[in-house]
Amino acid sequence: MTTRLLHSDKNVSDELDVAPPLHLSANYAARDADHLREISGPLGNNYYARRGNPTSERLAKVIAELEGGETGLVFASGMGAISTAMMAFTKAGDHVIGQQNHYIGITEMLDKVLPGYGVESTKVDQTSVEAFERAIRPNTKLIVLETPVNPMMHITDLKAVCDLARSKGIVTLCDNTFATSINQRPMEFGVDIVMHSVTKYIGGHHDLLAGSLTTSRQHAERIWDLSMTIGAAGNAFNSWLALRGIRTLELRMRQHNANALELARFLEAHPAVHKVFYPGLHSHPQHELAAKQMSGFGGLLTFDLKGGYEAGQSFIKRLELVDYASSLGGVTSTAVQPAVLFGGRLSPDQVLKQGIAPGLIRFATGIENTDDLIVDVDRALNGL
């Protein structure tokens, strides 16, 4: 995989640069009328920066190669990507199926944004394929998936849900941010559109904001057409940073995976911890399904402290190697208390439905030495 990450975009242009060039121009000149028509067509990127950018196109090509998709698009953020896709495949009178647990931005799209445009949604238990089937209506046009899900690490049976959707002519959209293309390739299970918050593991260094979609050319043209109006095109410099980051994605994910699994095993045996949520543990109720559709289990885990909310606050403050930060996927570890993070944007009822306990900690492992990370966590737990 690393070899493909390094070389899959070598032939995107005639340039001889060993490192990808950074294209900062917002406008492009045409040689003549025929050339103008050529560069201003669907998915064109050498015409005007709101339509795309050669650096962003290069990044989209590498991500599409990883995911096994035909083509892709880069956006200003992960939410820019997923909101554009959701709006491209729905209109007033349509119905969308989502999951009870999602990244908060997707939940707000389903609950607040789409209804304002006449699109209804139903959120279901993602662990039940039957729940997806029961929710389907004649006007269902889109099913939105996320697995493993933030923050409770539930798993969705991608093949079963996608087989069901395809039999009904419903488009499927999957957020693959937390698994990454290294651990999971949703298109192999039938997903139509794969989304990444490039800000997280693909960028990998806490220093950029971007999102991506990988799909068929037919779907990409439909999304691209709407994106021209919305204006959510990716930033060239952020795409260039992401190209740097993605080259080491497989190497970094090996350490993210290893750190999370060892930390999860350590926490499961610690007396201060009530429960650990990580699909790589045999105690996870969906471990077999996770092992079936994932080659690694990711760098994100959550655990519930016995001391509740105050214990969570105290634990995070005592950490020395870990930043108290809401984002994740970079080379350094971060931790956050979902009751605080989600409580500011979701109602108490929504927080409860997400299964978020007061003492829950969402921990995103970086690529630190595993033993150093466990020592830091152990010291913080023992000080409660």
Image (cartoon, rainbow, N blue to C red):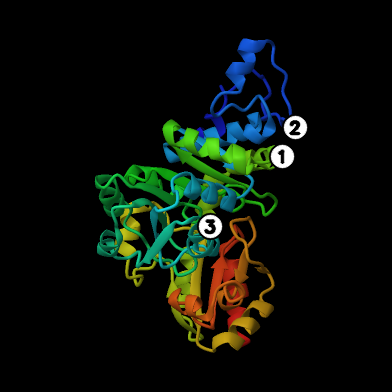
From the top left corner, tell me how far across and down residue 135 is, in percent: 30, 62
Q: Nearer the viewer, residue 87 or 304?
A: 87
- Whether residue 263 is visible: no
* Relative vertical location of residue 145 with respect to residue 181 in this rendering, above or below: below
Badge 1 amino acid? Phe
Label 1 vs 3, first from the N-terminus: 1
Q: Are marks 2 and 3 in contact (CB under 8 Å)?
A: no
Query: Residue 35 — which label?
Result: none
Query: Residue 24 — which label?
Result: 2
Query: Looking at the rendering, in which quadrant would you find the C terminus?
Result: bottom right
Q: Tell me the residue that label 3 is attached to.
A: 256
> Mark 1 falls on what kind of element?
helix
> Mark 2 falls on what kind of element?
loop
Cα separation, mark 2 vs mark 3, equals 33 Å
From the top left corner, tell me how far across and down residue 162 is, in percent: 31, 49
Q: Tell me the residue that label 1 is attached to.
A: 237
Q: Residues within 10 Å of mark 2 (few under 14, many from 20)?
A: few
> Mark 3 falls on what kind of element?
helix
